[in-house]
Amino acid sequence: MNSIETSGCAIHFNNACYEHISQFLTTTTPSKIFVLVDENTHLHCLPYFLGQIGTSLPIEIIEIDAGEQHKNIETCLGVWEALTELGADKKSLMINLGGGVITDIGGFIASTYKRGIPYINVPTSLLAMVDASVGGKTGVDLGGLKNQIGVINSGAMVLVDTAFLSTLPEAQMRSGLAEMLKHGLIQDASHWQVFEALEEITKSDFDTHIRQSILIKKAVVDEDPYEKGLRKILNFGHTIGHAIETHALNHPDKPELLHGEAIAIGMVVEAYISQQELGLDQAVVKEIKERIVKIFGHPKIDQNDFNAIIALLKHDKKNEHGQINFVLLQAIGKPQIDCHAGTELIINALSFYNA
Ligand SMILES: NC(=O)c1ccc[n+]([C@@H]2O[C@H](COP(=O)([O-])OP(=O)(O)OC[C@H]3O[C@@H](n4cnc5c(N)ncnc54)[C@H](O)[C@@H]3O)[C@@H](O)[C@H]2O)c1
Ligand SMILES: [Zn+2]
């Protein structure tokens, strides 16, 4: 598969990854390589990765605990200290080998250690491949607030080797798939259509769809890296989705919901709002709901939770001037940013999802 080399950070795929990193290591000769992993990617991804890059440069492994709850400044402190103790200098290279938690926190650590050392993202989850590792957003959570602290800084390159997906749990695969569906809905009707019969997609076709999904994200980010306007379209499904995700996290007694699972619900709810506000075709809204329910199942949102979810919406980071900000669709591939919706419509939309 051809690399994606528009502006900035290049993205390479599968076997080509290892030719490119080898070239990079030869030309930049890092003083030391630091590979950041969590316990899962340490076990499942690191041995294969080290076998593939086969370099004689010194390598240190730094492991952090897996999971979003560790994407915080305490974890950064531990890694910054480890880097210092292990003698990382300005010429060291950091390689983030993991899901979106590793690429987000690793990118942030590298961007701030000694005012910035080069880093490479090697995403190992589907979500990190098609979304988190691309576009230069790095950072950590603060208290209950997601991605509250961070910087925008693209790494030197992204290496997407889909072989890593063979050990990724199925629920995590689905979570990443939600972002691929989103990329189709906001920018490319044909990319949405390829998931009509998911069960018939071969591995090599799926690789092509991963590349296409990354291409969509990268094109948006290249045009608007600092989210002044266009980049906001990537938030489709995320206003409602984040509120549902946060609500589930605040209530550990309720069934666990992965990010993509919450976003999938958010896309159905926001498709309904799109119909009411922008005239999105009713048949399209029905198709979006049916496809998402087919892939993600149909966990209902408890009616008693609607008010708590709406209260969370009012605190969304994307709000401006006290109004809840939505990305809505006029049609598949035609998003509109900075839209608003009243409480009653949001309640109707949540009920539409449940029905
Ligand atoms: N920077 C961005 O633009 C951006 C965009 C979207 C999401 N994100 C961030 O990404 C994070 C979510 O990413 P995620 O879903 O990858 O979460 P994650 O990094 O927690 O990975 C999910 C789980 O899968 C495991 N795992 C990863 N690869 C594996 C493999 N190949 N085999 C077996 N297990 C594997 C991880 O250890 C973890 O337990 C969130 O923190 C989110 O904020 C960032
Ligand atoms: Zn997302």
Image (cartoon, helix red, strand yellow):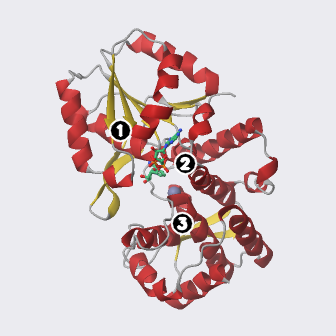
**Of pointers 3 and 1, the one earlier in the residue sequence:** 1
Q: Residue at x 52, y 38 (%)?
A: 124
3 or 2: tag closer to the N-terminus: 2
- Left-right relation of 30 to 309: left
Q: Is residue 183 left or right of residue 304?
A: right
- Residue 345 versus residue 229 in the image, above or below: below
User: Whole-Å distance between the Cαs marked 3 and 2?
Assistant: 13 Å
Under circle 1, the secondary element is helix
Q: Residues within 10 Å of mark 1 (few under 14, many from 20)?
A: many
Q: Earlier in the sequence, mark 1 or mark 2?
A: 1
- Dot 3 amino acid type: Ala
The quadrant the C terminus occupies is bottom right
On the image, the x and y values in percent for residue 82 come to 22, 31
Query: What residue would you read off at disc 1?
Result: 106
Reading the image, the residue beneath label 2 is 127
Circle 2: residue type: Leu
Is label 2's Cβ within 8 Å of ligand 1?
Answer: yes
Image coords of residue 271 (percent x, y): 65, 73
Which residue is the extreme one toward the bottom? Answer: 344
The residue at which mark 3 appears reads as 262
Number of residue marks: 3
Sort mark 2 into few (<14), some (14-19) or many (20+) by Cα contacts within 10 Å. many
Residue 239 left/right relative to 281: left
Q: Secondary structure at mark 2?
A: helix
Q: Position of residue 198 (x, y in %)?
A: 76, 52
